[in-house]
Amino acid sequence: MNLAIRDIRRNSGRFALTTIGIGMLLMVVLGMGGIYRGLVDDALVVTRGVGADVWVVQRDTRGPFAEISRLPRSVVDRVATVPGIHGAKEFVFHTIQREHRGKPLRMGVLGLGWPIDKGEGLPLVAGRPLAQNHFEMIADESLGLALGEKLRLAKDTYTVVGLTRWLVASGGDGIACFTSRDAQAIQFDEPGESIRLERRARRARADAIDFGRTQPRVLERAAGTSRDIAALPGPAISAVIAGLAPGVDPANVQRIMGGWGDVTVYTATQQEELLLKGSVDRARRQILLFRVLLTIISAVIMALIIYTLTLDKLHPIALLKLIGAPNRTIMGLILQQSLIMGALAYGVGYLIGMRLFPLFPRRVLVTNDDLLRVAGIVLLISVVASLLGIWKAMRVAPNEAIG
Amino acid sequence: MGEPLALEASGLTKVYGHGHTEVVAMRDATMRVRRGEVVALLGPSGAGKSTFLLCVGLINPPTRGSVAIGGRLIQDGPDSLGDLRRFRREHIGFVFQKSNLIPFLSAVENVQVVGELVGKAPSVARRRAMELLGELGVGARSLNMPTQLSGGEQQRVTVARALANQPSLILADEPTAALDSVRGRQVMQLFRDVSHTHGTAVIVVTHDHRALDVFDTIYEMEDGVLTQTTHASVLGQRSAG
């Protein structure tokens, strides 16, 4: 006869409410882990998605995800000539915020190295990759844009031709993919008045020097477009990404390019580590601390509930001792109740979590490993929670049943 | 050599506290009870009756003296808590003033659990429980929870529980205190019946002098001193009082 279940049956209402309460706490414990996993996964989705083996970034910077990194476009050609490099291409990434349908629209702008990369490798759930060099975009569905929708950015209008799922930046902003030219046009968009003022300033500077006065073409070009002035650089890219030919040691390639004075080279693993240690690390530690606290709180609450349930049945426990029940029967009664409560609470937490987590604004990624780990924690706290009740029950004397 | 006594308590003394707080609750109490004998233990409150029951029930060890149940000397034998508890569940049944049923078990489960504690299969223990409840007239109430039973029915279930493992000794502490005179007498008669039917010795601590005729032997306890007496003596004292 299972005494634990029979006692639970008598206190079913209180037991059920307590179990639901603990279950919701465990759901938060589970969710915290899921939020952390989601953060990590979101942070790595772009770096993994582009499939680069080598990241070439501005000298002494940590790359485009950690800080501003600017490289001239010519670095792509330089990287391509390094032995062992396969498929060097430009990488443009920055974050913008615009107004759309009266609401702020914040997005990560990712430049694809057209025509090599049209976005075929992206996690498309609708539409198609880019099919032309300009004015098309692939948007993550978290941005709320529909297929075929048109969006005005800088001086151009872009059409959404594809939709991705869970393609987000480490900050949680949905990513929109453009050709790198378009991405730069969006990034370096300047108002006409600003351009006119810059041209006038250049003309004034040229006027002020002998060279400008003796060379009329210089004065003419100074007042013209930037692209006509050879001394002025073109729009910068964020990084150069490249693959490695089979069998090539990334350290060798890194050593060759490490000698260049204007770039820093990271392998894909290093880039991921930088990303995780930088933007995600604090969030990770914060979530971990919350998780530990919640686990302790769950254990304390369970211990108190089990202790209270034990206090309620001190008389039956004394009676059981009086009629000769061995200690293991009484310990089993309390331990089983704790384990049943833990198991049911875990089930409640899992079921509610699986329905609630998809509604969260950021991804909550609960893996099987996490489920197993939390199940282990629940088992442990169930045992620990029962100890106080068992201790109390062991102190009850059989003669307390009399009188 | 004759059949061993159901209970042989010799020179039981129980002292609580020590030094200037020392209280002697029972001194040099001796009682011999045969199988099938029904014994009443009378005495005012605080006389030491419950202390005597706790000692012979192996719940509270005496300071001095020995207890033998079914010919087995307990004080010299199994001395660990677990051994005493095992001996208790196999050889002693308890009935108390309050029905003392486990509140989260039904009537039949309250009886069945005792059988399971001695290792009987649940089905065997349940069958035995149903038989006993039927025998004691509460078979129809076997699935009811204790709160759904009347005081008399609860006491019958308690008696059934005490009998579940066919003990050699039943200890009852004021089992009729919560019952009216008719039900009280029914319970006392029940003890006599089960004692004679099952050959179980029964010791009943009681204040109720109205049903003394059901007892084979009467003991009185006053200020911790146990003495054997007779029906006539007790009834005489009562009428004199």
Image (cartoon, rainbow, N blue to C red):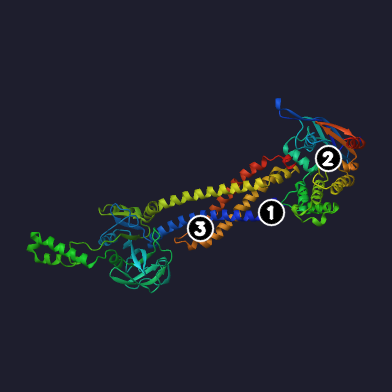
Other-residue count near label 2 (Cα within 10 Å), few / some / many at <14 / 14–19 / ≥20: some
- Going by the numbered disc 3, the residue's amino acid type is Thr
Residue A44 visible in rendering? yes
Chain name for mark 3: A
The residue at 62%/51% (across/down) is: A339
Q: Position of residue A345 (x, y in %)?
A: 59, 55
Q: Camera-side residue: A330 or A380?
A: A330
Which image quarter: residue A182?
A: bottom left
Q: Is residue A296 above or below residue A194?
A: above
Q: Is residue A59 left or right of residue B135?
A: left
Name the residue that disc number 1 marks.
Answer: A10
Q: Position of residue A323 (x, y in %)?
A: 76, 44
Which image quarter: residue A78?
A: bottom left
Name the residue that disc number 3 marks.
Answer: A367
Which image quarter: residue A176?
A: bottom left
Q: Secondary structure at mark 3?
A: loop
